[in-house]
Image (cartoon, helix red, strand yellow):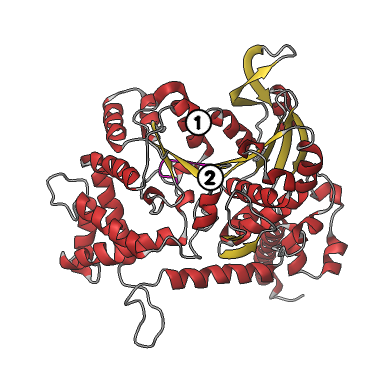
Amino acid sequence: RCPALPSLAPRMASWFLWIALAVFVARELWRNIPPWMQRQLVPARILRRSAAPASETDPPQQSSGGGDSARAQGGRGVADMTSLATLAGKLSSLFNLATEKLRLEGDVGEDGEAKEPKGMDAAFLILMRLLRRIKKEAPQTRDDEFCEGAEEDKVAEVRDVHEALEGMDKLFELADWAYDEWPEEHEVEGLERKDGTGEPADDGKCRATCLRDALRGIDMDLLRHEKIALPGCVAHYVALDQKQKLAIVAVKGTSSLEDLLTDCCGVAVTEILPGPFAPSSPTEIRCHDGILTASKRLASDLTALVEDLLLPAGYKIVITGHSLGAGVAALVGILLRSTIPALEKSPPDALKVVAFASPPILDHAAAEACRDFCTTVVNQADVIPRSSLANLAVLRSVLAHAVRPRMVERGLMPEDFGSAGAFLQHLVDGDDKEKEWFMTPEEIRTAIAEALAKVPIEDPEHLYVPGTVFLLYNSWAKETADAEAAEASSDGKEKIEAADPPAHGVLRLSPAARLLRCVELDLRMVLDHLSTAYRSSLRELLRGGAGCATGEG
C-alpha cells in the first residue's frame, strides 16, 4: 500500500474537475462557432466523422434551391467571403485605408511611423460633454444650424409631410419582418388584419407566429423566404400583393456575426455596370465592398424572377430593408436596373427602393444619380447612415485642431496628476451653468465648417447614403423642454417617452448634405438606429405631429 495515495486523491479530483470544466467550455465554444468557420479551422475528414445529422444541427430553411456553399461562391466576379483568408484581407484593407485617410498633419513621428496624437480620447469626452451642455442651455443653436444648413444645401420646403412619407410606416413594418423574429404570438404593429371581405377582422389587430402568417393577415402571399446566414450573403423574402399588383423584396439587416462581417468589409471598390441604372447615370461606380458582394448574389437570384415573371405580369416592385438590408436593397435596385432592359425605359415606380437607416454605400455621383427611384430614411441622430471614413475624418479634425489646443491652453490635457484632476473636474462640472464655456456654440460651429472644407466630397474613397434622403428630426429646444416637463412630472410613461422622443420634423436632403457629413454626437445616436425608434418617428409624423418641416425641392 502506497502512503502517498491518500494525499494525492484530493489533488487528482481537483485536476479532474478542472479538465472536465475546460472540455465543457471548449465544447460549448465550438458549438457556437458557425459551421462555415468550423470547416476552415478543422480538417474536413474530422468534421465528417464528428458531425451530427443535418436534421439535428441545421435550422430548417426555405429556399429557392441551391446550398449555402453555392450561394457563398455566387456568380462570376463575386468573392467568397466565407474564406477566412479573404475576410482577413478585406478587413486589413479597411484598416490600412482608415489609417491613411484619418491621418492628420503631425501624426508622423521622427522615425516616419504613424503615431496617434496625445489626448484624442480625452478630447472626445470633452466634446461630448460640451455638446450635452449646448443641448441643455443653447438648444436653439443646433436647430438654427439645421435650417441654415438646409438653406446652404439649396433646400426648399416640403409642404406636405403626409404625401412625402405616405405608406412608409407600413413599408417599414415589412422591412422589419425580414429579421424574422417572432415571439410566441407577435402583435404586428402598424398593420391591420383583413378578413375575406377586406374589412378588419376581430379586434382589427394582426397577430402572427411566423412570417407567412403575418403576410397572410394583410392579404399578401409569401413567394420566397431565404434564411441564409453567411458573410457576403443576406437573408430576405419576396411577397406578393396580387390585388395591388405589388411585389415586396425585404432584406434583413444586421443581426448576426455574419452580417457584421459583411458590414465591416467597407472599403470602396469599383464596379462596372452593364448599362445605366438611371438617365445620365454613370456605368462605373464606387461602392461598399461587403454590401456589393451581398447585393450581387441577391440580384443574381432575383433577375429571372423580376424579368420573366413580375414585370411581364405587370407587378410594381419595391425593394426595402433596414440597416445592412437597406444598403443591400439600394445596390440590388441599381444592379437590376442596369441589367434588365425592360427597366431601362420604365418609370421610376416600376422598381423603387426605400432604404431605412442605410449605411454609406455609394460614391457621390452614383448616390445622386439614383434619387429618382431610391429614397433613404434617416432617423434623427442615427449613427449608421453617418458611419463613413469621411465623417470620421471630420470628427478627428475637430478634435485635433479645435478641442485639443483648447485643452492644452486650459491645462486640461491629462498628462500628470494635476492636469488629470483638472480634466476630471471639468467633466464633473460640465453641466454647471455658472462655469465658463469651454468652447462657445459658435466656435464649435466654425470648427466643424473648417473640418468639412478639408474633406473633399468627390474623393473616390468616400461613400454616401443613396438617393433622396428624408431626415426625421426633433428640435433640441422641444426635446429639452419636454425632458424638463417630464422630470417635473410623476408620470413614469411620460418620462420614458421624453428619454426617447420621436421625430417631429422632416428635412429632404441630398446624399452629401452637410447635416449628413458629420456624426451627430448625441447619447441617443445608437438608440435612434433601432427599429423601435424608426417606427415611433414615422408614426408620430404621419399622425400629424410634424412641426416645422423643410426639404429640398
Residue 218 shown left or right of residue 286 in the figure: right
Q: Given the image, on which type of amino acid does mark 2 rest?
A: Arg
Q: Is residue 200 left or right of residue 45?
A: left
- 128 sits to left or right of 439: right
Q: What is the quadrant of the C terminus in the image?
A: top left
The foreground one among 155 and 465 is: 155
Q: Residue at x 37, y 51 (%)?
A: 514
Q: Is residue 36 magenta?
A: no
Does the stretch in magenta take in 379?
yes
As drawn, 119 above or below 65: below
Judging from the image, what secondary structure is the residue with disc 2 in?
loop
- Crowdedness of circle 2 by 10 Å Cα count: few (<14), some, many (20+)? many
The x and y percentages for residue 264 are 57, 60
Residue drawn at point x = 38 percent, y = 30 percent: 504
Q: Is residue 295 above or below residue 224?
A: below
Callout 1: few (<14), some (14-19), or many (20+) C-alpha neighbours within 10 Å? some
Q: Quadrant of residue 233?
A: bottom right
Point out the stretch of residues depicted in magenta: 376-382
x then y, percent, for residue 298: 72, 50
Residue 11, quarter of picture: bottom right
Left/right placement of residue 528 relative to residue 425 reads right
Residue 227 appears in the picture as rendered: no
Task: State the image coordinates of residue 114 (x, y, percent, origin top left).
Answer: 40, 79
Q: Secondary structure at mark 1?
A: loop
Q: Which mark is residue 21?
A: none
| CA gap, disc 2 and disc 1 | 15 Å
Q: Nearer the viewer, residue 79 or 38?
A: 79
Residue tagged 2 = 371
Q: Which residue corresponds to mark 1?
A: 165
**Foreground tag (2 vs 1):** 2
Front residue of this view, candidates 187 and 242: 242
Q: Looking at the image, is 249 positioned above or below residue 416?
A: above
